[in-house]
Image (cartoon, rainbow, N blue to C red):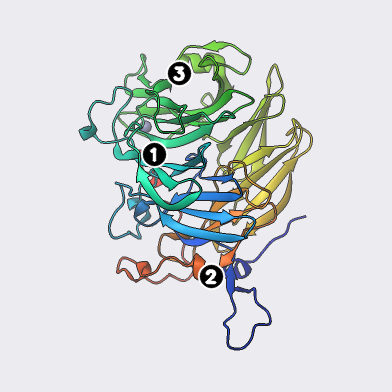
Amino acid sequence: METFRSTVRLAGPLFLAFLLPCSISPVVAVDYFTDNGYGNPLAVIQHPCAEFYNGKTYVAYQGPHEDPYVCAYDHAAKSWFGPVKAGVNPMGNTPDTSDPKKVDNHGRPALIVDRMGYIHLIFGGHGGEFSFGCNALGTPGKGRQTHVVSEKPGDISAWKVLDNVSPFGTYSQFVKMDDGDIYLFYRHGSHRSDWVYQKSIDDCRSFSSPVSILKHKGQEADPNVQDSWYAWLDKGKGDTITASYVYHPCKSQGHTKERYNGYYMKMNCGDDTWESASGAGLTLPVTKEEADQKTLVYDTFSAKLKSNHGTCHVDDEGNPHLFFRQQNQVLYFRWLGNAWQGPTAIPGGDGDFIVESPKVVRMLLSCDGGVCWWKTTDGGLTWAKESCPLSSTDSSYITTALVRNGRPESRMVVSENSRLQNHLYRRLYLLGDSGPIGRPEEEASNLGELLKDSEFSPPAPGGKIRNQSGDHTPDE
Ligand code: ZN
């Protein structure tokens, strides 16, 4: 059964205190935990953006000035802390603009908690600048990939920079293994760059040098086109890491944003080898030719159908389930042991999913005016919509990868773009199986003087939902 909730209920006040003495003002609660997300504050590709650790869910997002902000939710106390600004994004503008095209958005933070309980963020990168020196693995862009860590374990109130990762990164992603080793994956520059990882075995106090996994290079037949990639990495079964990715033919002349195909491969962390779904060994960094031959899940290039990256998770048997995006649907696949099953189309924009068993998968997807759960119980052959814990006729929503180690009440962080506003500040929700975790309105209101800035004008009645942003500039 679908359960729709109106905008008024979501955005409007709910009175927590029903019978308070007249002299005390009632506490007003709202369903979002902050209103100072900025631009496109979150995305699936910078992940995780949140982790449940030792009783708290830590959430990172892009706030004013495109800087990284962090909030923490204490599940036992049912209380929020933050937002706290955790660093400075070199790509931020002052003052904040209301023009979405001027917001870069690539410097959104990824978050991980190490085995000592310190919280780490990587943010601020969009390929790095020429002035940083030689980028042997790619082409510089702008920004600076920056690493900060909380001063104390489990405490988001103070942060410091650790200068120990490449400044050329963008689309930063953390993968934490069962033993606490942490891999940082990212693209080592702008489009024409390898995808790499740096590994830390000491809680991100130091990292290995970058290792290329996907190679950028000019095509022999047409040097105007460079092979380029968008990848999504996550922990697989045991000591493995999965990579699902799409191909971008990056043209010097006549550049487009086109992306095609869908690919999958796996890393064996014990010996740093990579293999295809069927177990064929791969040579690093994987070239377009080898990817096409051994790792292709879904060919869209032949039919000139565009595709985009989704997410990937494994079941208890280690078999990958994944989706790629295509127009207004996601295409689900799963590995049967000797072949890919799929694609199965599910209407939706973007999101992530939980593999409960090889045949039972639940997917949380943005859709037109909502965020909805979909479920399959037959291994992905058919899907049914279960519920929509967020929906509105006046808003669209940006989803993220699932909260790492998320609880039933804290599965995903979601950003809201409302047509009722002309500025780029966003309400953010921590969404569980049945709805968001709210907060007193006074705590969730964090814009202060920002809206008084002259760059912002009153909302236009019936205006368009302003969700087009720098994400779609030529150098995404
Ligand atoms: Zn390109």
Q: Classify mark 2: helix, strand or loop.
A: helix
Disc nearest the viewer among 2 and 3: 2
- The residue at 34%/31% (across/down) is 166
State which quadrant residue 422 falls in. bottom left
The CA distance from mark 3 to mark 1 is 20 Å
Circle 3 is placed at which residue position?
Answer: 288
Does residue 343 show up?
Answer: yes
| Left or right of residue 28: residue 383 | right
Residue on which disc 1 sits: 476
Q: Earlier in the sequence, mark 2 or mark 3?
A: 3
Q: Position of residue 397 (x, y in %)?
A: 54, 54
Point out the frontmost of discs 1 and 2.
Answer: 2
Residue at numbered disc 2: 441
- First-in-chain label (3 vs 1): 3
Q: Residues within 10 Å of mark 2 (few under 14, many from 20)?
A: many
Label 3 amino acid?
Lys
Callout 3: CB less than 8 Å from ligand 1: no
The foreground one among 111 and 396 is: 111
Report the Cα–Cα distance between label 2 and label 3. 51 Å
Is 466 located above or below residue 470 in the figure?
Answer: below
Q: Secondary structure at mark 3?
A: helix
x and y, in percent, of residue 370 in the image: 61, 55
Tell me which corner region of the image, top left, top right, bottom left or bottom right, holds residue 171.
top left
The reply to whether discs 1 and 2 touch (Cβ–Cβ < 8 Å) is no
Kindly identify the amino acid type of the residue bearing the numbered disc 1: Glu
Q: CA distance from mark 1 to mark 2?
A: 35 Å
